[in-house]
Amino acid sequence: MQIQSDPVVIPSKELIDLIQAVRMYQQQVARLQTPDWVNDNITRVKDFAQRNFVDF
């Protein structure tokens, strides 16, 4: 059994636009802030333990 496929040609402009879109998306994801409920849970755990995460 042999798989045959035709080569696909993507114009360089389209490929560059796709790469830029992915990079922009990655930057937007990196800028997302931690939700307040996560910060509240972290604070609650620190309060219960009466410690900070930098305490040894």
Image (spheres, grey):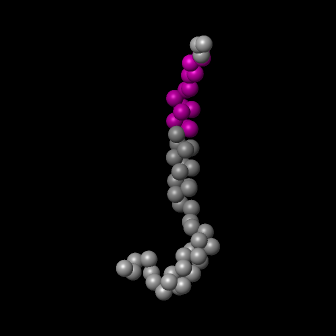
Where is residue 5, by image quadrant?
top right
Q: Nearer the viewer, residue 55 or 26?
A: 55
Residue visible at 59% across and 16% down in the picture = 3
Residue 26, x across and y down, in percent = 53, 51
- Count every numbered label the image shows and give the total: 0
| Residue at the limit of the structure toward the left, as seen here | 56
Instruction: Report the span colored magenta.
Output: 4-18
| Residue at the limit of the structure toward the top, as seen here | 1
Location of residue 11 with respect to 40 vertically, above or below:
above
Residue 22, x across and y down, in percent = 55, 44
Where is residue 14, by image quadrant?
top right
Residue visible at 45% across and 83% down in the picture = 51
Residue visible at 56% across and 55% down in the picture = 28
Residue 4, x across and y down, in percent = 59, 14
Quarter holding the C terminus is bottom left
Q: Nearer the viewer, residue 19 or 1?
A: 1
Quarter holding the N terminus is top right
Residue 54, x across and y down, in percent = 40, 77
Whether residue 21 is in magenta: the answer is no
Q: Nearer the viewer, residue 50 or 6?
A: 50
Whether residue 6 is in magenta: the answer is yes
Where is residue 40, by image quadrant?
bottom right
